[in-house]
Amino acid sequence: MLSLIVFWPALVGAVLLCLPARLSARLFVGVWIAAGVVDLALVVAVWLRLPRQGYGFEERLPWIPSAGISYHLGVDGLSLPLLALTAVLFLACAVFALRETRRVKSYVVLFLALQTVSSGLFAALDLILFFLFFDLSIVLMYFVIAGWGHGERARAAALKFFLYTFLGSLALLLGIIALFLAAVPHTFDIPALAAANPLAGGGLYAGLTLLALGVGLAVKTPTVPFHTWLPPAHTEAPATGSAILAGVLLKMGAYGFVRIAMPLLPAGWRQYALVVVIVGVVSVVYGALVALAQTDVKRMIAYTSINHMGYVVLGVGAAGLVAGSDVQARALATTGAVTQMVSHGLITGALFLLAGVLHERGGTYDMRAYSGLAARTPRFAALFAVAAFASLGLPGFSGFIAEFQVFTGALGAAPVPTALAVTGILVTAALFLLALQRLFLGPLRTPDAPGAPRPLPDVRVSEALAVAPLLALALVIGILPRFLLDVIEPAARGLVELVAR
Amino acid sequence: MTGMNENPLALLPELFLLGGAVAGLLLGSWLPRRRQGLVRWLATAAAGGGLVGTAFARQGETVFGGAYAVDTATTATRAIVLVSVLLALWLSADAVTGHRRETEFAVLVQLGGLGAVVMAGANDLLLLFAAFLLASVPFYALVGWAGDARATEAAMKYYLSGAFSGVAMITGFALLYGAGRATAYPALRDGLAPAPAALAAVGLVAVLAGLAFKAGAVPAQFWVPDVTDGTPAPVAAVVTTIPKVGALVGAYRLLDVAVPADVVAWPVLLAVLAAASMTLGNLAAFFQTSVQRLLAYSTISQVGYLLMAVAVAGRAPGALPGLLFYLAGYAVTNLGAFAVVAALPRARTLDDVRGLARRSPPLAGALVVCLLGLVGTPPTAVFLGKLTLFTAAVDGGMAWLAVVAIVNTVASVFYYLRWIAPAFRAEAGDGAEQPVAPRATVVAVLAAAVSVLLGIGGGAVLPLVTGGLAS
């Protein structure tokens, strides 16, 4: 079942690859949408039958037994929400892409491959399998940014993205090798390593292993000071590429913390949890402050991503502060971190798609070039406002649920950092209100071409169909979060127990 | 050792290569020029026969008075070299057809391949030197094969550095023989234990200089860029792939079997050479604009990764399987990259490949797979090779070397991407009207496919290259 979810998009992509490129663009995107619907349906079926404890839908085949590598898939409460997020976001991008005209066949095939890679990463229970998907996501995203971005600068940004995140992935590989060698018998299997807990004693080796893993995952998450690749990559990527990059690919780093670093290196994680908390808080505050100073709407959203991923890092760090907090608080922080991953994926995905709408109409992301759009494009203004309020953590949306849990869980163990992190919400609120005011209020002004005023049409049906469900889902999670929390909480509690042993 | 064991059938794959070369030479002398393609078919049949012979060879013994080892390492080298010969024969097919030295190309490739195999199996200093010459002389001629001014200059340079390292090597043998009083590896090991360490060290360094020349590693890497850039792509493909395989396995066997690490501290020396090779190769490759020069430097850095295995020889169980698997992956992937170059005979600079994705999607796909394969992106064969080598390096107590290799791997992405990126640009390059060589394209796609399959099917292949050295 999981193999089908993972490889179904790639299979469809392979079939599309055999068709001639001159067929209509609608056909390719239509097949992509259909494939996405099927994948989402399969994920929902898995969701309904997930066991409350342990891994569900496990598949395990020997792959390279002499090197300790197996093909091992499985989902639990930590990975399934992200798997579902992947399916939802890719479907949204497929609908959004109905308007794409440039080399549609390659575009669709690339995104289908990317969906396979992303789903595979969240379902992988073997470190090498995880690494394989981790690396391929970088390669495929490079082609998306370089091929469909905004011209020459896109290629430079894509190169920077590739080099930076590839360095991270190889640091991760070093950590994986260190874990492999520490375990007897040598294995790359995640559940086996979690059970064996080979580096329970801590010490220098465990510290260096955690450092390698931590740097590798921190680059991808990204946290300050490893975030510098993110703003140019987002600014130059196409709208759908940005949505996937922010919504799915960033989660790979954060997911790596809860799947690899925490359960496999509990001693090291406890020892350095405070460092993680501090890095998280710095990301929160720094990301928010720099976002406040941006005039480019996409750069602004990119920096709020750093801010939002900072809450995730704060949450998983707090889960390692065993002294000074009880199990319940730590489980709450972990649950909040995972919820935040889902919430950020939905809301930021929607924001990036909306930024793409703006760019398509006006040809620029510069907020100073626009004003008073609310009168001309009411639907766009409404969607953007809802997404902005969701992103700044308004109660009733998923972001509030997530951040509230992170803060509550972290407050007891790390009161000062948590208090500092709360200011991040304040700054985010300010910057989104400022952006709304710049774009939508005041006299109407659009970046006109000389002599010919641009028509600035409102959001089209296909665009609205892509964005609105994401926001609706964020709203549902904000009001009725139990369906999500019931899945995450048992797994988070299990993870906290693994960290505390 | 039971008797002398002089069963010639133990050398069946080597005999196939030799027979293919000799018969090809004779046949080629009698054929008209337009029918010389037959020689390639004969060579193909010989290599195929050699592969069958490899599959059925007995393993784990030494033959001919202990001078030649037939074990996992030799078997793997045979397979790698024979497959490389096959790929080289066919990626060159478009370029050599109708050339007046078409026969010679096939014959020289086979003879050089034979030398590489014997280098890997040599279990005696004298045989190692004979193999060194056998792997060198045909390639001197091959480098000059095109006969134009650039090729002649390249051949001259190759010959001079080869002659120099050959002299260094034979001097080193003399010193090692003087110190250890034997030329057979096992006896040499016993003899070196009480020997003066300085003498043995000087001898070993001189021998390594010769092997480094064949492998194209620091400090004997100067010929690589000039030879690779000065010769046609098929020739460059051969000289940067086939001798490397023999030299590296030969070096591994020599160090692991014959030279005790407590007499001469070779692990550190090899580690430094490995780090220097990968770093120098990468730095020099950064801003190259000629595709063949870029690939030349890339092969130097690849040798650096491979030398990691030699540096931890005997101290990490994954070193030998890692070396052999990486060599297999490297040979296929590198030949695939050269096949792409051979398929575009007029595209000599990175800019000339612009618009390739539109003109020939399969070729562009092969280029991406091969170059990302050389980077070590999963699931290609080189990734699995790198994984086992990095693991062996950390396991063998050289974690710093693994870190250096990782930093270098990231740096290498930069120049490989400089090549990939223009291929996907929409606008066409100056070479837009150039023909795409059909057979080289097929080889490129095939090599790319094998490189991926070898990585995915590593579970089946890795046990085949796992085993000890016979001595």
Image (tube, coloured by chain):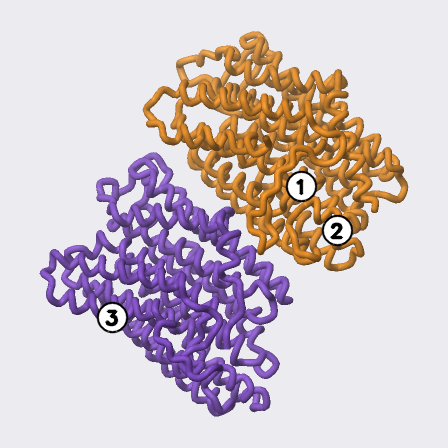
Chain colours: A orange, B purple
Density class for disc 1 (Cα within 10 Å; few <14, some 14-19, many ≥20) is many
Q: Earlier in the sequence, mark 2 or mark 1?
A: 2
Above or below, comparing residue A418 to residue B453 in the picture: above
Q: Establish whether labels 3 and 2 are both on one chain.
A: no
Q: What amino acid does circle 2 point to?
A: Ala
Disc 1 to disc 3, how far (Cα)?
54 Å
Q: Chain of mark 3?
A: B
Q: Is residue B413 visible?
A: no
Disc 2 to disc 1, how far (Cα)?
19 Å
The residue at 55%/44% (across/down) is A132
> Which residue matches tag 2?
A196
SS of the residue under disc 2 = helix
Q: Establish whether labels 1 and 3 are both on one chain.
A: no
Above or below, comparing residue A437 to residue B226 in the picture: above
The residue at 55%/60% (across/down) is B389
Residue A93 as seen in the image, left or right of residue A43: left
| Discs 2, 1 touching: Cβ within 8 Å | no
Residue B422 location, quadrant: top left
> Which residue matches tag 1?
A256
Density class for disc 3 (Cα within 10 Å; few <14, some 14-19, many ≥20) is some
> Which residue matches tag 3?
B141
Q: Chain of mark 1?
A: A
Q: What amino acid does circle 3 point to?
A: Ala
Residue B64 pos. (x, y %): 40, 81
Disc 3 to disc 2, how far (Cα)?
58 Å
Density class for disc 2 (Cα within 10 Å; few <14, some 14-19, many ≥20) is some
Please state which of residues B306 and A243 is positioned toward the viewer in this rendering.
Answer: B306
